Image (cartoon, rainbow, N blue to C red):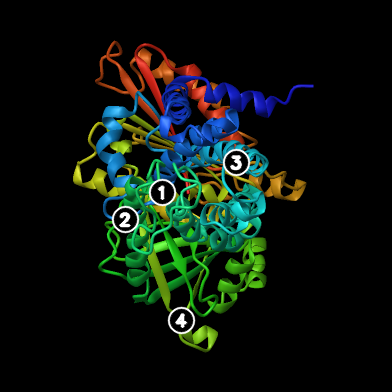
């Protein structure tokens, strides 16, 4: 029986820009593998070693590919001033047709998958090599001596152990349930790269029987006939680890909290001031709180706008770290639960807002607020929003956080009359429970009130929770100008959005000339769809917006990544 999820993944990898990328990426790797094989098999100086035949040819081909991957595995991980995101800002407009340049984490995974495959090939071939060396005595050594007494064998096994730990803890279920395990094991990359750079010391590939050791750098002599790929791959390592040291020093500058807000559904809003912290809408940061953990760093989306006089993040209390942080800030999960219960009761306009939040002061918790350490910002900013005629922002649950910053930024730019190509904004938020609407209720109310053009921004809030009969009765009873669940003029919609119908309606309205007044329907219009939320929902949205595209209405889909 076929697996629909697997088939969908294969289809996605074999279509569009990813197909082009896969052809170029894996085509390059196959070329390097063939070149490594050929250079080994045709080198007369390595004739004794070539008596091992296919195993040594395969190991050499795979080794050259791994040197190539060892360089690129660090490229998307860099986050400094010359990081992948900043480079992407330059190359994306020129190369977006070629490959998904804004998906640096996706690219990092592709390199990791390739490394895993060729590591298996390289290691298996070398096990066969070492056994055949012992049998043929091409080298006067046993297989165990090559495995564990020589630098190549020793560093190879250390790298295998590190890869096992890093790959297993990188699984999405482990990342979600124990992010700190993923975080710590991924820092073993430092030792992995040291092993990669020193792997050729002693030179298994040489024209002598005895190992070619040397007591001065690079610790091998003229008889070594390997690729010496470390001379090229080590430079990205210097850049990456130098940047890591700089980021660690920079992050040690402590930051003071200026305000803590507790919202329904266990969401905390932390506001802090850091004048040196420059960011753009849609970016994120790493946060550490030494009072909670001296070593754990966790990623959170920035929910404030660059125009705000503070920086804010919204954090939902769902894991050990976030719950401990909530208790340290006085925003206990128990208090959040009570606030959520109150938020789920419909109210009339003028009553306490269903999503009313609580401000927590240092006096309320009986001690000073903890110090923060901030590392960032990271991620490609959402500047493409202003290059679209229509921006469709879709958030699923806490996935709404990047759009809080983007909506604020759009609002500020609208007041300045600096919207670029942007003519309309569709904001869609899907929540499981009514309490979640309280996270950004004040922001949505403020933006909704400020709209002088009723057609510019449309807010659509979808509630997937099944309400009780009493709750539905109260909603019907309080059905006046304001929605009783959110206190917005926009009515809450129940159930899941029909994205096929939503995108089809937008396309028909644009082509009919009613959606973008004053714009010729025959001109090409760009609809940018930006989503943050569950991966399965992202696939569905991407399929529907792609299907809704026509010659005059082009859709571009982007998913928020950590």
Q: Nearer the viewer, residue 184 or 273?
A: 184
Q: Residue at x 48, y 24 (%)?
A: 545
Residue 401, percent from left and from top? 47, 51
Left or right, 41 with respect to 87, comes to right
Relative to residue 245, is residue 539 drawn left or right? right
Cβ–Cβ under 8 Å for marks 3 and 4: no
Which of the two labelled residues, at mark 1 and mark 3, occupies the earlier sequence position? 1
Residue at the image position 67 percent from the left and 71 percent from the top: 334
Return the residue nearer the eye: 340 or 474. 340
Mark 4, mark 2: which one is toward the viewer? 2
Q: Are marks 4 and 1 in contact (CB under 8 Å)?
A: no
Q: Which mark is residue 463?
A: none
In terms of sequence position, does the residue under pointer 4 or pointer 1 come before the other? Answer: 1
Reply above or below: 537 against 258. Answer: above
Give the mark, 4 or 2, whose residue is nearer the N terminus. 2
User: Measured from the top left, where is residue 407 in percent x and y?
Assistant: 37, 46
Residues at circles 2 and 1 in contact by the CB criterion of under 8 Å: yes
Dot 3: few (<14), some (14–19), or many (≥20) neighbours within 10 Å?
many
User: Which residue is identified by label 3?
Assistant: 126
Q: Distance from label 2 to label 1 (Cα)? A: 9 Å
Does residue 369 lie above or below 50 as drawn?
below
557 on left or right of 279: right
* Label 1 sits on residue: 74
Q: For the residues labelled 2 and 3, say whether their Cβ atoms are less than 8 Å apart.
A: no
Q: Secondary structure at mark 1?
A: loop
For label 4, the SS is: loop
Q: Which residue is mark 2?
A: 239
> Marks 2 and 3, how far apart in space?
31 Å
């Amino acid at each position: 029986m076929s697996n629909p999820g697997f088939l969908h993944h294969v289809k996605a990898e074999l279509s569009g820009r990813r197909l082009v990328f896969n052809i170029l990426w894996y085509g390059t790797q196959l070329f390097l593998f063939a070149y490594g094989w050929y250079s080994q098999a045709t080198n007369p100086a390595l004739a004794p070693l070539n008596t091992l035949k296919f195993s040594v040819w395969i190991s050499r081909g795979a080794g050259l590919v791994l040197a190539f991957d060892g360089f690129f595995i660090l490229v998307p991980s860099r986050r400094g001033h010359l990081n992948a995101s900043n480079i992407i800002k330059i190359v994306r407009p020129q190369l977006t047709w070629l490959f998904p340049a804004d998906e640096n984490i996706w690219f990092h995974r592709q390199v990791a998958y390739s490394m895993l495959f060729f590591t298996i090939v390289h290691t298996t071939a070398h096990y066969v090599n070492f056994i055949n060396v012992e049998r043929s005595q091409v080298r006067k050594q046993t297989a165990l001596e090559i495995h564990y007494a020589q630098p190549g064998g020793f560093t190879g096994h250390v790298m295998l152990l590190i890869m096992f730990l890093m790959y297993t803890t990188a699984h999405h279920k482990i990342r979600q349930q124990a992010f700190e395990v993923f975080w710590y094991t991924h820092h073993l990359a430092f030792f992995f790269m040291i092993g990669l750079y020193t792997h050729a010391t002693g030179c298994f590939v040489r024209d002598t029987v005895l190992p070619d050791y040397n007591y001065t750098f690079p610790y091998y002599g003229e008889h070594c006939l390997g690729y010496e790929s470390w001379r090229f791959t080590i430079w990205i390592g210097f850049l990456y680890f130098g940047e890591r040291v700089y980021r660690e020093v920079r992050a040690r500058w402590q930051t003071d909290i200026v305000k803590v807000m507790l919202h329904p559904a266990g969401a905390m809003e932390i506001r802090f001031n850091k004048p040196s912290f420059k960011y753009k809408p849609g970016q994120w940061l790493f946060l550490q709180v030494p009072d909670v953990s001296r070593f754990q760093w966790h990623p959170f989306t920035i929910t404030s706008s660059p125009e705000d006089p503070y920086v804010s993040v919204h954090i939902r209390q769902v894991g050990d770290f976030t719950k401990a942080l909530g208790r340290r800030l006085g925003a206990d999960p128990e208090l959040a639960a009570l606030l959520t219960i109150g938020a789920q009761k419909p109210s009339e306009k003028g009553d306490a807002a269903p999503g009313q939040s609580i401000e927590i002061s240092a006096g309320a918790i009986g001690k000073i607020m903890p110090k923060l350490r901030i590392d960032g910002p990271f991620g490609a900013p959402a500047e493409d929003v202003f290059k679209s005629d229509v921006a469709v922002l879709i958030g699923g649950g806490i996935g709404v956080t990047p759009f809080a910053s983007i909506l604020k930024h759009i609002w500020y730019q609208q007041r300045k009359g600096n919207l670029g190509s942007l003519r309309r904004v569709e904001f869609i938020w899907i929540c499981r429970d009514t309490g979640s609407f309280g996270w950004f209720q004040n922001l949505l109310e403020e933006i909704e009130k400020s709209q002088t053009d009723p057609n510019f921004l449309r807010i659509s809030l979808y509630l997937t929770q099944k309400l009780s009969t009493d709750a539905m009765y109260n909603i019907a009873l309080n059905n006046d100008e304001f929605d009783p669940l959110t206190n917005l003029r926009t009515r809450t919609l129940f159930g899941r959005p029909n994205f096929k119908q939503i995108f089809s309606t937008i396309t028909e309205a644009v082509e009919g000339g009613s959606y973008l007044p004053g714009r010729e329907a025959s001109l090409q219009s760009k609809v940018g769809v930006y989503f943050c939320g569950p991966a399965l929902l992202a696939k569905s949205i991407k399929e529907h917006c792609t299907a809704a595209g026509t010659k005059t209405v082009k859709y571009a889909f982007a998913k928020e990544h950590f």
